[in-house]
Amino acid sequence: MGTSRDDERKTTYREALREAIREALRSDDRVFLMGEDVGRYGGCFGVSLGLLEEFGPERIRDTPLSESGFVGAGIGAALSGMRPIVEIMTVNFSLLALDQILNNAATLLHMSGGQLPVPVVIRMTTGAGRQLAAQHSHSLEGWYAHIPGIRVVAPATIEDARFMLAPALADPDPVLIFEHGSLYNAAGELDPAAAPIDLDHAEVRRPGTDVSLITYGGSLPKVLTAADELAAEDISAEVVDLRTLRPLDDDTITASVARTHRAVVVDEGWRTGSLAAEVSARIAERSFYELDAPVERVCSAEVPMPYARRLEEAALPQTADVVAAAHRAVD
C-alpha cells in the first residue's frame, strides 16, 4: 500500500542524515559514532546535534584532531565486531587517513583470505560552493572510487540521505559516504516508504529521449534544473543519478544511452583522471554503436578551488554549462 501525501513530512538533508544515525544507534548496540566535534558541538555541519545528550559519550565519541588515528580506531572496532560510523569533517582531511582506508580497510578481507571483514562506515563532506577555499572544497570521491575493496556512495536526495546508512552498515565491506556540503540545508518531503535503498543501482531521476545527463551528489540539483531548461527548448533530457560510485551500475548507464543515443557526464571533480572519464570510457566500451555524438564531460576547472565567490562559481560546473554541453551533443 502506498503512502498518502499526508504521510510525508517536511525535513532537510541534514535532518535526514541525523535521523538515519539515530535509527542505527537505537536498533543496534554495536553502532557508535566517532569523529571530530561530533559530540558536544553537534558535528561540524550540525548532523549529530543532540545525539550526545540522547546516547551518551560511549556511543557519540569526540576524537582528537588525528584522522589517521581515529579512522584506524574505527577499523579496529569494526574488526572487533562493532559497527562504527566514522565522521571526517571534509574530504580533503580524509587524505590524512588515506593509508588507513587504502592499506587497511580496503585490503584486510583479501589479505586474510576472507577472515577479516571490515564493516566500517566512513562519512565525510565533499564539494564546493560555500566559499571554504582550497583545503575544504574539493570533490575527491573519484579517487576513492579507484580503490578495490570498498563501496563508495553519494546520496543526492533527502530519501537517500535518510535510507542509505542502514544498508551501508549491513555491508561487510567498508563503505564511504560522501555528503555534498551544499545539500545539508536542502528541504523537501520525506516519504517513509522510500526505504530500503538499493546500493547496487543508479536511479533515473527524470526520463528522457534526447540526451542522458549522468551525474551524482551535489551536481544533481543543477542537472535537474538544466533538464527543465532543455525541456523548455523541446529537448528531452534523461537524468541518471549514479548514487553508488563504486561499483558503478553499468547496466543503468548503458540502458539510458540506448534510449537517448547521447550522453553528458557531469562531475564536480577535476576533468583529468576523473569519475566522468571513467563513465565516459565505459560508455565507449559498452555503447559505442549506440552513440550519435561524442560523450560530453562537464567538470570543475583544474585549479585549486578559489575562495572568492565569483571565481568559485566560475570554477564549478553550473547549469548553463550542462545546457551548453547537451546542445553540443544534440545539435
Image: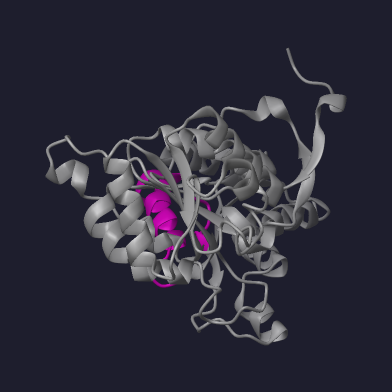
Residue furthest top as drawn: 1
Segment tinted magenta in the rendering: 271-296
Viewer-proximal residue among 162 and 272: 162
Q: Is residue 92 left or right of residue 37?
A: left
Q: Is residue 206 left or right of residue 167?
A: right
Tell me if residue 293 is in the magenta stretch.
yes
Q: Position of residue 68 (x, y in %)?
A: 33, 65
Q: Is residue 97 left or right of residue 136?
A: left
What is the quadrant of the C terminus in the image?
A: bottom right
Viewer-proximal residue among 225 and 264: 225
At 63% from the left and 58% from the top, the residue drawn is 42
At 42% from the left and 32% from the top, the residue drawn is 170
Q: Position of residue 322 (x, y in %)?
A: 65, 63
At 56% from the left and 57% from the top, the residue drawn is 38
Which image quadrant for residue 109? top left
Viewer-proximal residue among 144 and 78: 78
For the stretch drawn in magenta, what is the main secondary structure? helix
Q: Position of residue 205 (x, y in %)?
A: 66, 41
